[in-house]
Every structure is written in structure tokens, then in C-alpha cells.
Amino acid sequence: MKVLIVEDDPGTRLILSRMLRGRGYDVVACATAEEAIKAYHAAYYPLLFLDLSLPGMDGFSLCQWIRSQPDGDQHLILVGTASDRKEDLQKILDAGADDYIAKPYQADVLEVRLVIARQRVKNIETRTTSTLPKAFCLASPDRRPDSLPLNKRKTTASRRGLEIQAFSGNRRYA
């Protein structure tokens, strides 16, 4: 599964990347929300792992931005936070995050969160697959197009992981 990590601290970003790669995840790591938005447009990530304290656009705003996108509900967002205050945790969930994990990260807790995340991603994929036309469901679950040209008109397909070569805006899906 592809994971987009957005963490401004180089050491934490490296440790998270290594931990996730060691568990078989395909990881792309960014230091800022702006880099993450570029990566988001370039590929599909079922799991996004966000830090809240980012330079420029913060993690709350990035989370809200992701959820505001046409396929924003097709991602699982896990937020890392050093705060344990109830108001902050509620703010994380209100911004659109699915779950959070306390910093400093503990390997055993992270492992449990990743198992939960993987199961939730499977549930999203199952739910989304069952709502698409059969022609879309025959494709590979590795990539996702935003829209596919059919009969000279644009038809939107919001499905996790379709492998179809198509061009839409500045994204290429292949």
C-alpha cells in the first residue's frame, strides 16, 4: 500500500519512512504541506500520515484540504501529535482525520494503528468498488484516475486504485 508521510522533522520523517518500508509499505515522504499537495496530485495514496506542526500550511489545513477534494473521502488520514489535550484531539478529528497517534511514536502502538488503517482502507476499497460500474471494477487496484473519457464526455470515477491509462488535469495515471 502506498503511504504519503508529511513530517517536517527530518529525523522523524526518516524513522517513519524506514519503519513503514520495513513493513512493506511503498512510502513517499514530504517535509511540507505544499510538497504533499504536489505528491497528492501525482499519485494516489490510500494512507496519509500527517504531522500537525508543519511550516507554511499546517497539518489541520492540509487535512481539511484533502477532505475537500473530489476523492477526499477515499483516503485514510492518520495524524501524529504531541498533544494529549481533549480539545486538540477533537480538533484533529473535526479537521477530517480518521485517527491519531501520540508522539513520540512507539513501534508497537504504530503497528496496531497501521493494522487498523489497513483494515479501514480495505473497507473503503470494498465499499467504493461495489458502487462502480463493472467496467471500472475489472482494472487493477494499484492506481486511480480522477476521470476517464467515455463517449467523448468526461465521466468521473472515484475508486481507489484503478489501473487505466488516462490523463486528467496535471495528473497521469498509468
Image (cartoon, rainbow, N blue to C red):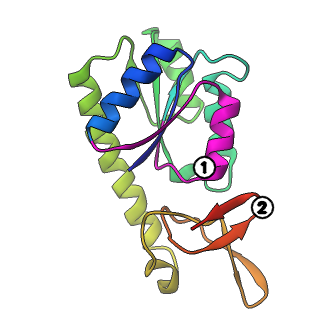
Tell us which disc is closer to us: 1 or 2.
Answer: 2
Instruction: Give left or right: position of 50 versus 26.
Output: right
The answer to which of marks 1 and 2 sits earlier in the sequence is 1
Q: Quadrant of residue 38?
A: top right
At x 46%, y 50%, the residue is: 46
Residue 102 to residue 48: above or below: above
Residue type for callout 1 = Gly
**Residue range corresponding to the magenta coloring:** 24-48
As for residue 132 lying within the magenta part, the answer is no
Viewport quadrant of the C terminus: bottom right
State the image coordinates of residue 30 (x, y, percent, origin top left).
57, 30
Question: Is residue 117 shown above or below 135?
Answer: above
Q: Secondary structure at mark 1?
A: helix
Mark 1 lies on residue: 72
Picture coordinates of residue 163, whole percent (x, y): 50, 71
Name the residue rendered at 75%, 57% in the picture: 170
- Classify 165 as above or below 94: below
Q: Residue at (36%, 11%) from the top-left corner? A: 104
Dot 2 falls on a residue whose secondary structure is loop
35 part of magenta stretch: yes
Q: Which mark is residue 169?
A: 2
Residue type pointed to by label 2:
Gly
